[in-house]
Image: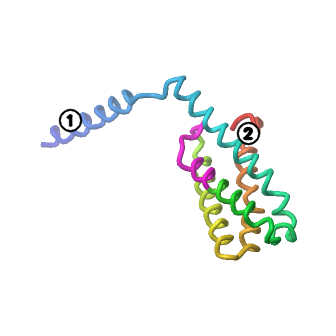
């Protein structure tokens, strides 16, 4: 009886190794395509942030009703892009990318919701802190922006 159990366990482990070893790996073309779409999203995030930040750092501009439509559009775009980044394949296997991108997405959804509910000061505070996510990813290696 013990031999049957041992053989079953060994067979199960061997089968697992074979299945994992035969799993389809990403082709170089797929990897290049994923990296390209990742870079496109990063560039869109960067341009949206560049448009939004001058208003975020100036409370008077951020609270000016004339800027609310622009801020709302930028926050919505930022929220969508952060969600895309959190859901899509990352260019590296670094597990911190997954955690940071999901947290970034959650915070941007909250910032947008707060702005929509009229709590502009809290939304502004949250957006000011989003740059922490940029820094946490882009300073993981000495490659900085070129890495992502």
**Sequence-first disc among 1 and 2:** 1
- The answer to whether residue 139 is left or right of residue 97 is right
Considering only vertical position in the picture, is 61 above or below 15? below
Residue 85: in magenta span: yes
Query: Please, which residue is most extreme toward the top here?
Result: 28
Q: Which mark is residue 141?
A: 2
| Dot 2: element | loop
Looking at the rendered image, the quarter that the C terminus falls into is top right
Of tags 1 and 2, which is closer to the observer?
Answer: 2
Residue 7: x, y in percent? Answer: 20, 35
- The answer to whether residue 61 is left or right of residue 45 is right
Query: Please, which residue is most extreme toward the front here?
Result: 66
Residue 74: x, y in percent? Answer: 71, 57
Residue 138 in which image quadrant: top right
Q: Which mark is residue 7?
A: 1
- The answer to whether residue 53 is left or right of residue 148 is right
Judging depth in this view, the residue of 55 and 97 nearest the camera is: 55
Judging depth in this view, the residue of 88 and 63 nearest the camera is: 63
Considering only vertical position in the picture, is 22 above or below 89? above
Report the span colored magenta. Answer: 80-93
Residue 127 in which image quadrant: bottom right
Question: Dot 1: few (<14), some (14–19), or many (≥20) neighbours within 10 Å?
Answer: few
Residue 22: x, y in percent? Answer: 36, 27
Question: Given contact means CB atoms under 8 Å apart, are the residues at marks 1 and 2 in contact?
Answer: no
Judging depth in this view, the residue of 116 and 14 nearest the camera is: 116
Looking at the rendered image, the quarter that the N terminus falls into is top left
Residue at point 74%, 34% (across, down):
146
Residue 55: in magenta span: no
Residue at point 64%, 75% (across, down):
117
């Amino acid at each position: 009886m013990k031999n049957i159990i041992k053989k079953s366990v060994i067979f199960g482990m061997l089968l697992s190794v074979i299945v994992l070893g035969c799993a389809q790996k990403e082709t170089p073309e797929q990897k290049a395509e994923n990296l390209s779409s990742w870079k496109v999203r990063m560039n869109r995030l960067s341009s949206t942030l560049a448009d939004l930040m001058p208003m975020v750092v100036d409370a008077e501009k951020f609270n000016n009703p004339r800027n609310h439509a622009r801020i709302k559009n930028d926050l919505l775009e930022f929220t969508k892009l952060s969600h895309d980044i959190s859901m899509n394949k990352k260019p590296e296997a670094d597990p911190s990318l997954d955690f940071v991108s999901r947290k970034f997405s959650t915070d941007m959804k909250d910032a947008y919701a707060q702005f929509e509910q009229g709590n502009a000061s809290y939304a502004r505070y949250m957006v000011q802190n989003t740059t922490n996510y940029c820094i946490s990813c882009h300073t993981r290696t000495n490659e900085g922006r070129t890495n992502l």
